[in-house]
């Protein structure tokens, strides 16, 4: 199947007269941005092939006939390792008749030079996310290019044998060892590594290459001009040879494998086997739909002016604190606007779980009516989630019912009207990028995807002081009235203020004090086992070895802290009491309390992963760069540290990675970076934050990608992996030797109206499933870690991990 560019929505590959470029993807996390640049700076149509596409490799001559030029992308590994470059090696051996212009970027460039006599060596210090001025010859593709600042992501470099003998000067001549490699650009500012070759061309063949990354957000505009200059040269070469592409461009299609899951969540399932399963899976959507009746879905809702009502008080007054619920709680944090409560109605709410290691999907309202379907791949889940959402979109059924507010229509300011609430684990994310799971993932008892289809919800808008009570169930006025009465009760007794317990009457106060006391007694007897410093530091060093070897540019190393708490009278820690303590100690905008199926999550994440609204506006907010607060750490010093090259490089890599993830779905030209590396202050840390945004194409009817497509294309969260994502995750799995589970995954909601919001699961405690019935102790886990770069120190990384653990561990320390 032909895969016409990763960003197929931006491309009209059938357009007449367009040139065709074959992009060779070496599994890099920046490829989609490069493809966007080729499409929009050069006006070319781009088709992607992966380096390990065997069929394309075996038929490479035929494949190339359909293209005007090839761009060979960056990637992990070493150009001398055939697995890392795959079919790239064929390009350098093409006969005169089959030749065509080739442009290599980073790994592609190194491969070009290696094939023509150069040596590939390790840099003394790898350059990942480092921006520098490029000194160039002003000739060839650099003609007319002004000052060029460019981002580098490399550990290896091209050694032309004459590098060092030129006294640190850039030079533009070939030498006898590499007579065909003509230098075109150098980095002469690098004091540690000395002059490093940044661009070259072949003296007789139409091969060019650059060591830096023209697609990076921090490479100046001259980066795309350079590509345009190359394109002029390439086309001149094609004209001089009268080279024509095969009349049928799609002739290449039968040799190329699809490169990514560009199928949208709404796309029809194709193979027969998939079809069979899909009908089983589809019955899930129908089962969920049945619970709302066969008629049009109505959203019944009321709105109340509640000022600053506390979601905690509301949960308790509704008597839900011991039940299965999902609370997304912005904890009055200045960066969180909404709090959302999803109610699980025992025996009625449909729960959907998926286990990555055996690919089983389970759904039902309770264990008795649970159905289990064996899936071929996680990709089948997205369509069923999307289908369930689509079947309930109240917009499709005319107006919802506004029973009390009198304004009619739907509550547009409420970001969630009902739909799925829950999480997607890190391992589920690994499956989406074809990373094999660690063997011990088989022992995991907590689901990897865990959602409830929430019909009844309450949304508190802390900015406007409005609270929405909403239900998708038919004839649910009595529940709505019950919540409304409870809200009035809270308001009347002024229980909405923070001193709520004092005003809620003696019974509640007594219960709360008793709960606190019980928890503190258990916590006083708990055992905390944090990662050993020496072992953690060794892991940092192992990460750095992979970075130095060129296998990764950044690795988000993590480990976990275990808290074992004795169960007394068959009772462990009350998760609700624990959550209340945690949110007091570490308020954060993405607070989460989840009890669903056998998972218990108590968290205070500062990091939004991805939000999209009903108009299709998407936003990522990755955090990368952490400084611990302390009496001696002034805001100014924190800013200085976070503005250092180490922290900025760390952040830049993730920004470029997320631009790639988002571009793959909506096209690079629709992505923007409105905030690049701004410092934000939290309870215990300062963080460096960037914002990447984009807009889904407006689709008529139900065509085109959705927010869920962006979500599935971006897992696991780049800030928790490092770049390039796939190789980095494989390295981390081998170093960490454990599944991460819910930690490092994403938690949030998919709204029936088409919106969604997910945080990154960090600074969070998770209770082991099954422990409740496992005798007299229970275990809680807190994952923590940080991005290791070549500039990290092992001790510094250990301290950073410790700081992050503490943000959640404080809740376990007895008073
Ligand atoms: C890995 C964690 O956090 C991630 C790593 C960060 C960093 O390296 O600075 C910052 C926020 C998160 O994306 C964690 O909190 O455990
Ligand atoms: N960005 C890249 O292509 C990196 C190439 C190679 N793996 C290196 O680290 O030098």
Image (spheres, rainbow, N blue to C red):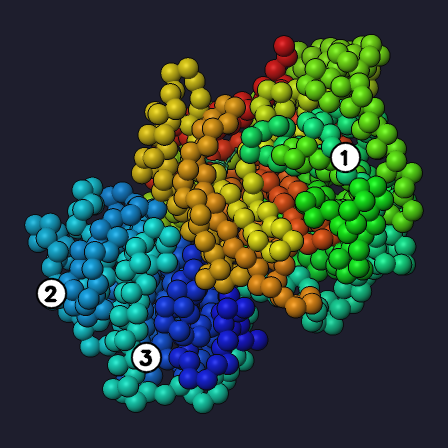
Q: Which residue is mark 3?
A: 100
**767, above or below 437, in the image:** above
- Give the quarter of the figure containing the N terminus: bottom right
Q: Nearer the viewer, residue 773 or 584?
A: 584
- Specify whether residue 655 is in view: yes
- Name which residue lies at 80% across and 60% down: 397
In the shown orientation, is residue 316 left or right of residue 338? Answer: right
Q: Which of the 4 image quadrants contains residue 330?
A: top right
- Name which residue lies at 30% across and 46% down: 130
Cα–Cα span, label 2 and label 3: 24 Å
Cα–Cα span, label 1 and label 2: 75 Å
In the shown orientation, is residue 650 left or right of residue 137? Answer: right
- How many C-alpha atoms fall within 10 Å of the one at disc 1: few (<14), some, or many (≥20)? some
Q: Where in the figure is residue 297, as x and y percent of width and height?
A: 83, 55
- Specify whether residue 183 is in view: no
In the shown orientation, is residue 535 left or right of residue 295? Answer: left
Q: Which residue is mark 2?
A: 173
- Name which residue lies at 68% across and 32% down: 465
Q: Nearer the viewer, residue 811 or 271?
A: 811
**514, above or below 70, in the image:** above
Q: How many marks?
A: 3
Q: Which of the 4 image quadrants contains residue 94?
A: bottom left
Q: Where in the figure is residue 769, as x and y percent of width and height?
A: 73, 33
**399, above or below 342, in the image:** below
Q: Where in the figure is residue 35, as x and y percent of width and height?
A: 43, 65
First in sequence, mark 1 or 2: give its number. Answer: 2
Q: Which residue is mark 1?
A: 304
- Name which residue lies at 81% across and 52% down: 400
> Does dot 2 land on a helix, a strand or a loop?
loop
């Amino acid at each position: 199947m032909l895969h016409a560019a990763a960003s197929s929505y931006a491309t009209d590959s059938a357009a007449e007269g367009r040139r065709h470029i074959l992009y060779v993807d070496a599994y890099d996390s920046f490829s989609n941005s490069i493809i966007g640049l080729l499409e929009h700076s050069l006006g070319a149509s781009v088709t992607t092939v992966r380096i390990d596409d065997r069929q394309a490799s075996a038929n490479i001559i035929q494949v190339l006939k359909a293209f005007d030029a090839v761009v060979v992308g960056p990637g992990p590994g070493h150009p001398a390792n055939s697995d890392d470059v795959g079919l790239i090696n064929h390009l350098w051996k093409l006969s005169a008749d089959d030749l065509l212009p080739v442009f290599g970027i980073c790994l592609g460039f190194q491969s070009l030079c290696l094939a023509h006599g150069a040596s590939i060596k390790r840099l003394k210090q790898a350059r990942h996310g480092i921006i520098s001025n490029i000194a160039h010859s002003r000739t060839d593709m650099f003609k007319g290019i002004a000052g060029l600042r460019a981002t580098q992501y490399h550990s290896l470099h091209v050694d032309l044998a004459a590098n060092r003998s030129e006294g640190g000067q850039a030079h533009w001549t070939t030498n006898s060892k590499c007579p065909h490699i003509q230098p075109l650009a150098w980095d002469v500012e690098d004091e540690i590594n000395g002059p490093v070759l940044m661009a070259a061309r072949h003296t007789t063949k139409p091969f060019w290459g650059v060591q830096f990354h023209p697609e990076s957000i921090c490479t100046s505009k001259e980066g795309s001009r350079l590509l345009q200059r190359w394109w002029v040269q390439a086309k001149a070469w094609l004209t001089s040879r009268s080279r024509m592409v095969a009349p049928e461009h799609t002739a290449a299609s039968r040799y190329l494998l699809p490169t990514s899951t560009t199928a949208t969540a709404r796309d029809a399932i194709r193979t027969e086997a998939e079809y069979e399963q899909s009908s089983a899976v589809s019955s899930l959507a129908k089962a969920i739909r049945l619970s709302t009746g066969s008629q049009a879905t109505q959203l019944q809702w009321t709105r109340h002016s509640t000022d600053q009502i506390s979601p905690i008080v509301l949960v308790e007054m509704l008597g839900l604190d011991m039940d299965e619920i999902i609370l997304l709680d912005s904890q009055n944090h200045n960066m969180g606007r909404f709090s959302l409560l999803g109610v699980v109605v025992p025996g009625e709410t449909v729960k959907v779980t998926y286990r990555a290691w055996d690919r089983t999907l389970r759904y039902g309202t309770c264990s008795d009516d649970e159905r289990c379907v064996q899936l071929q791949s996680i990709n089948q889940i997205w369509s069923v989630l999307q289908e369930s959402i689509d079947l309930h979109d109240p917009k499709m059924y005319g107006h919802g019912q506004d029973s009390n507010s009198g304004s009619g229509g739907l509550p547009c300011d409420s970001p969630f009207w009902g739909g799925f609430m829950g999480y997607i684990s890190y391992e589920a994310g690994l499956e989406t990028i074809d990373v094999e799971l660690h063997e011990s993932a088989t022992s995991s008892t907590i689901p990897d995807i865990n959602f409830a289809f929430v019909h009844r919800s309450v949304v508190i808008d802390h900015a406007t002081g409005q609270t929405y009570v909403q239900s998708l169930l038919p004839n649910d006025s009595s529940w709505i009235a019950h919540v409304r009465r409870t809200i009035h009760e809270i308001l009347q007794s002024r229980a909405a203020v923070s001193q709520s317990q004092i005003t809620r009457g003696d019974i509640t106060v007594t219960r709360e004090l008793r709960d606190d006391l019980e928890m503190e007694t258990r916590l006083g007897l708990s055992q905390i086992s944090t990662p050993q410093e020496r072992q953690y530091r060794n892991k940092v060093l192992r990460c750095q070895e992979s970075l130095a070897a060129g296998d990764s540019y950044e690795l988000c190393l993590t480990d976990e802290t275990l808290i074992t708490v004795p169960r007394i009278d068959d009772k462990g820690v009350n998760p609700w009491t624990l959550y209340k303590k945690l949110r007091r100690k570490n308020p954060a905008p993405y607070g989460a309390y989840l009890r669903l199926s056998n998972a218990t999550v108590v968290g205070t994440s500062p990091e939004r992963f991805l939000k999209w609204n009903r108009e299709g506006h998407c936003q990522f907010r990755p955090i990368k760069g952490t400084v611990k607060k302390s009496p001696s750490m002034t805001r100014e010093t924190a800013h200085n540290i976070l503005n250092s090259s180490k922290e900025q490089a760390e952040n830049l890599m993730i920004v470029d990675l997320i631009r790639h993830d988002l571009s793959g779905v909506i096209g690079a030209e629709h992505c923007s970076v409105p905030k690049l590396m701004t410092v934000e202050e939290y309870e215990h840390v300062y963080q460096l934050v960037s914002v990447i945004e984009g807009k889904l194409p407006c689709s008529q009817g139900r065509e085109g990608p959705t927010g869920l497509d962006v979500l599935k294309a971006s897992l696991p969260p780049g800030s928790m992996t490092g770049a390039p994502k796939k190789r980095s995750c494989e390295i981390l799995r081998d170093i960490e030797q454990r599944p991460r589970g819910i930690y490092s995954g994403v938690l949030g909601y998919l709204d029936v109206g088409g919106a969604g919001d997910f945080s990154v699961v960090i600074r969070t405690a998770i209770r082991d499933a099954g422990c409740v019935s496992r005798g007299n102790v229970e275990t809680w886990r807190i994952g923590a870690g940080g991005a290791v770069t070549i500039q990290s120190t092992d001790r510094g990384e250990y301290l950073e991990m410790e700081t992050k653990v503490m943000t959640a561990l404080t809740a376990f320390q007895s008073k």
